[in-house]
Amino acid sequence: MHSGPAYAVPVVPMGAGQQFPGGAIEESFIENILRFNKGKIGTFYFTYQGNNKWNAMVYRGRVETAGRDHIIISDPASGKRYLLMMANLDWVEFDEQINYPFAKINPDVQASLTTTE
């Protein structure tokens, strides 16, 4: 049985953030957030629709890398590595602060947004 979403998933080329007026680039796609947290240990929650045996799975491991449609994590205790599909990822919990790729804003635009009273 099919385990991915039953709807069309929009595809954005990896590394291509959305361009906003004024030079801001949106890069907060899940794979970029995971890449910013490479090396951190987290708990990864997955669901597999239509799978009676493994409907929900929880993995604990270190972020090795992430792509547009996948993530690779490793279990620090066993060294076992997992290649997991992003389509099945529900959420991730980290034990420490999450690094986040804030949008890059053109300095001229940033200056116009700064108000002094």
Image (spheres, rainbow, N blue to C red):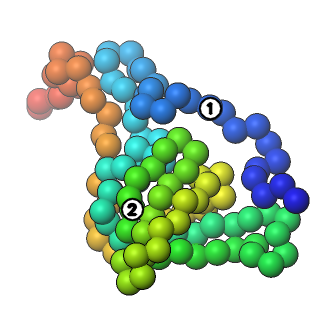
- From this viewpoint, which residue is outermost toward the bottom? 77
In the rendered image, which residue does mark 1 sit on? Answer: 11
Whether residue 43 appears in this view of the structure is: no
Quadrant of the rendered image containing residue 77? bottom left
Whether residue 2 appears in this view of the structure is: yes
Quadrant of the rendered image containing residue 62? bottom left
Q: Find numbered disc 1 in the image and state the secondary structure of the residue it sits on.
A: loop
Residue 112's tag is none
- From this viewpoint, which residue is outermost toward the right? 1
Residue type, label 1: Val
Q: How many marks?
A: 2
> What's the residue at 39%, 62% (across, down)?
63
- Residue 20: give x, y in percent of width and height: 41, 20
- Residue 105: give x, y in percent of width and height: 26, 26
67 to 104, vertically: above or below = below
In the rendered image, which residue does mark 2 sit on? Answer: 63
- From this viewpoint, which residue is outermost toward the left? 116
